Image (cartoon, rainbow, N blue to C red):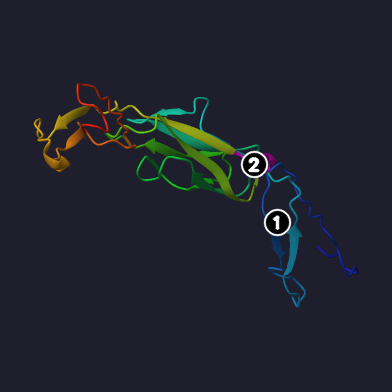
Amino acid sequence: LVPAGSISTSVTLAAVSDLLDEDNETITLGINVGVNATNVSTPKTVTITDNDAIPDVTLSAGSNLNMAETGGTKNITVTLSAVAGRDVTVTLSRSGTAKENKDYTLSSSTIVIPEGSLSSFVLLTAMGDVLDEIDQETVIIDINTVTNAQEKDGFQQQIVVIQDDDPPPTVTLTVGDPSMDEDVGVTVTFVTVTLNVASGQDVTVNMAKSGTAKDDIDY
């Protein structure tokens, strides 16, 4: 209300402080209806500048970083140091000796923590097979990028170990022809080693030799 005889009046516009890191916000003010005057004003915009600290992000795969090859799962969780007033997006990178989509799957490489929440997670799942492999394969998960927050201490990494649960294959030895003529040294027979199942790693077999024939003299 502008009293008769006056040319102006004021009201107070005050920002309300909070603890949420959020985008700068705007208030647009304009005259809706003027009584006993003609509105010639244009809308005015006031910007509330956020002054809250950006939250830190930490990455966790739990207290036990070992995972069974068959049926093993882990929640890969990102947690904020404080609730944010906007969505926080974290992308993950993967490395290690285990191969993605062969030894494990990750439900998503992007984690979104919704506005007002403290944490969110994706699921890491081991993929069982029947191959005897290296006893321990690693999945190394790092934070790649963070939007609307910052990586705590600039470095977060989790190393999950997939424990192989397949027994080593058995080896059998066969000889093609157990009788071999001495004639001119051209008669050969094949000595073969065979696994009962394929292995996920190289198998080395050391041969033991004995008998009355002498190595490099008779054969």
Q: Is residue 87 visible?
A: no
Q: Is residue 39 above or below residue 65?
A: below
- Residue at disc 2, secondary structure: loop
Quadrant of the image containing the N terminus: bottom right
Residue 20, position as x, y percentages in the image: 68, 44
Residue 21, position as x, y percentages in the image: 68, 47
Residue at the image point whose x is 33% and y is 27% from the top:
165
Relative horizontal placement of residue 50, taking residue 65 as reference (left or right) = right
Residue at the image point whose x is 65% and y is 37% from the top:
81
Residue 101, position as x, y percentages in the image: 36, 45
Residue highlighted by disc 2: 155
Q: Between residues 198 and 173, which one lies in front from this camera angle?
A: 173
Quadrant of the image containing the C terminus: top left
Amino acid type of the residue that numbered disc 2 sits on in the rendered structure: Phe
In front: mark 1 or mark 2? Answer: 2
Label 2 neighbour load within 10 Å: few <14, some 14-19, many 20+: few
Residue at the image point whose x is 15% and y is 40% from the top:
188
Q: Is residue 34 above or below residue 108?
A: below
Instruction: Identify the magenta region.
Output: 151-156
Q: Between residues 102 and 7, which one lies in front from this camera angle?
A: 102
What is the spatial separation of the Cα atoms under label 1 and label 2, in whole angstroms? 28 Å
Residue highlighted by disc 1: 24
